[in-house]
Image (cartoon, rainbow, N blue to C red):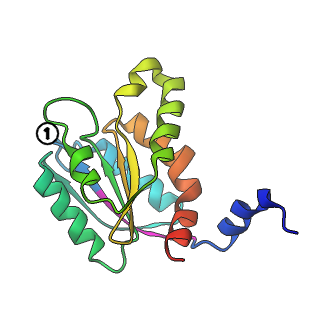
């Protein structure tokens, strides 16, 4: 009988090593020159062997966020959309709701783990994050805070180690 503990390891062994990703920065103020989080995400993805198929900056407007997600998901080369920004609780933060409305499946464990890890760095303020991961239109959709430190934490500890595994499971 197979050891159940080896299953994730075996899954990762047969998972794709390079995933096509779209990076979306949601911000009312960032420009290509000041988008430090988007740049960091692109660098970390590329450094891990993934392809950044495209990237964009849009204002924190639900219709704009949803438009880019739909367009990215229509691209056969894109298997994951990684977003930064708009996950807080200010009056302008509407990315969570925009993304939530599009999801076919939700993986709440991502947000729970991200906030747990974030708590170790920023304390109770971690509860203000509405980072999330789900599936829409057969693609992985990840929504991260706008902070470069939060993006690095999420990519290094959660997303990069599991991205191929997520895509493998999604394609089954």
Residue at image coords 49%, 70%: 170
Q: In this view, which residue lies farthest toward the top? A: 124
Residue 76 appears in which quarter of the rendering?
bottom left
Above-or-below relation of 147 to 171: above
Above-or-below relation of 44 to 128: below
Asked whether 167 falls inside the magenta stretch, the response is no
Side (left or right) of 6 relative to 18: right
Q: How many marks?
A: 1
Asked whether 21 falls inside the magenta stretch, the response is yes
Residue 125 appears in which quarter of the rendering?
top left
Residue at image coords 52%, 65%: 49
Q: Residues within 10 Å of mark 1 (few under 14, many from 20)?
A: few
Q: In this view, which residue lies farthest toward the right? A: 1
Above-or-below relation of 82 to 74: above
Q: Position of residue 6 (x, y in %)?
A: 78, 61
Residue at image coords 55%, 71%: 168
Q: Position of residue 41 (x, y in %)?
A: 39, 51
Work out whether residue 26 can be spotted.
Answer: no
Image quadrant in which the N terminus is located: bottom right
Look at the image and give the residue range highlighted in magenta: 17-23
Q: Which residue is mark 1?
A: 29
Q: Position of residue 77 (x, y in %)?
A: 37, 78
């Amino acid at each position: 009988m197979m050891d159940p503990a080896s299953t994730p390891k075996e899954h990762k062994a047969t998972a794709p090593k390079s995933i096509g990703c779209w990076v979306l920065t949601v911000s009312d103020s960032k420009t290509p020159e000041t988008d430090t989080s988007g740049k960091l995400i692109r660098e970390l993805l590329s450094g891990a062997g993934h392809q950044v198929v495209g990237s964009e900056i849009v204002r924190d407007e639900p219709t704009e966020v949803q438009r880019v997600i739909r367009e990215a998901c229509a691209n056969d080369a894109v298997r994951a959309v990684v977003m930064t920004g708009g996950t807080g609780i200010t009056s302008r933060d509407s990315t969570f709701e925009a993304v939530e409305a599009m999801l076919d499946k939700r993986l709440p464990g991502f947000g729970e783990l991200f906030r747990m890890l974030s708590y170790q760095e920023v304390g109770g303020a971690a509860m203000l994050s509405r980072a999330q991961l789900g599936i829409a239109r057969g693609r992985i959709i990840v929504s991260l805070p706008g902070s470069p430190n939060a993006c690095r934490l999420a990519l290094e500890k959660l997303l990069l180690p599991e991205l191929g595994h997520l895509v493998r499971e999604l394609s089954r």
